Amino acid sequence: EAQVTQNPRYLITVTGKKLTVTCSQNMNHEYMSWYRQDPGLGLRQIYYSMNVEVTDKGDVPEGYKVSRKEKRNFPLILESPSPNQTSLYFCASSMGQGGYEQYFGPGTRLTVT
Amino acid sequence: AQSVTQPDIHITVSEGASLELRCNYSYGATPYLFWYVQSPGQGLQLLLKYFSGDTLVQGIKGFEAEFKRSQSSFNLRKPSVHWSDAAEYFCAVVLVGNTGFQKLVFGTGTRLLVSP
């Protein structure tokens, strides 16, 4: 089944404790992206990647890091989480040029206390 | 700047009644437009998309949307709503760059409530 998977689905952590949210897709998509969803703000892009080793900032990149060492994986790293990063996070992927539909993972709900 | 506006934060519709969710976009070039649905606790599912051609597009679950360039709108419709349609709906436009860069710009969403 074609899908985007994220882990963990739920995470409660404390301020400053580094964490990684994994994202993997099995559709051989070139483009991957991370979004955060907050009430009243819709979804905002954090980082994106057009291909392996090619990443760039989205609209709200502060406090986040990403890497794209393999085509299928695009982990989101919070080096020192803060309470304002409490949010619902989505990973998405698409074919890339000529294929603009983005397919979303199930989401990761992160709470930072 | 490119933007998507969904003017209705909440809409309540009786089961069996028709539905129209509004979406307006601001984008200079020909837009690529999408509607996504998010059920409680779920990810986003693509309902339908418009790239070019026929301005009335059909999607899954009985939804359709009409692209109106003159009004910069892409409203979502369904002739008869079912209780399972209760969810949050997002309109989005994709920005595409020459290098292959692409970004979805989302509206803030419309929460649909379905009354018995």
Image (cartoon, helix red, strand yellow):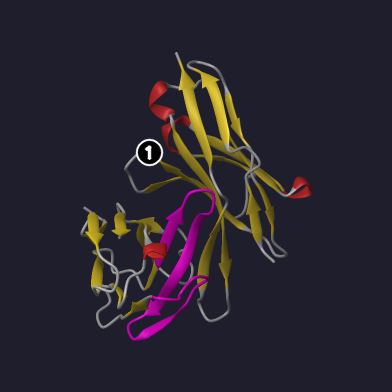
The image shows residue A73 at horizontal and vertical percentages of 25, 72
Q: Horizontal placement of B86 versus B12: left or right? A: left
Q: Nearer the viewer, residue A79 or B23?
A: A79
Q: In the image, what residue type sits under mark 1?
A: Ser
Judge whether residue B50 can be spotted in this image: no
Above or below, B90 against B105 in this view is: above
The image shows residue B60 at horizontal and vertical percentages of 43, 37
Above or below, A8 against B58 in this view is: below
User: Disc 1 is attached to a residue of which chain?
Assistant: B
Above or below, B100 against A23 in this view is: below
Looking at the magenta stretch, what is its main secondary structure? Answer: strand
Q: Residues within 10 Å of mark 1 (few under 14, many from 20)?
A: some
Q: Residue at x 34, y 86 (%)?
A: A53
Q: Residue furthest bottom?
A: A53
Q: Nearer the viewer, residue A53 or B65?
A: A53
Q: Horizontal placement of B101 versus B6: left or right? A: left
What residue range appears in magenta? Answer: A34-63
Q: Nearer the viewer, residue A7 or A49?
A: A7
The image shows residue A76 at horizontal and vertical percentages of 31, 72
Give the quadrant of residue A7: bottom left
The image shows residue A24 at horizontal and vertical percentages of 24, 66
Magenta span includes A36: yes
Q: Quadrant of the N terminus of chain B?
A: bottom right
Q: How many numbered circles does the render carry? A: 1
Above or below, B71 against A83 in this view is: above
Q: Residue at x 58, y 66 (%)?
A: B95
Q: Residue furthest right?
A: B70
Q: Secondary structure at mark 1?
A: loop
Q: Residue at x 41, y 22 (%)?
A: B83
Q: Which residue corresponds to mark 1?
A: B39
Q: Residue at x 36, y 68 (%)?
A: A82
Judge whether residue A38 can be spotted in this image: yes
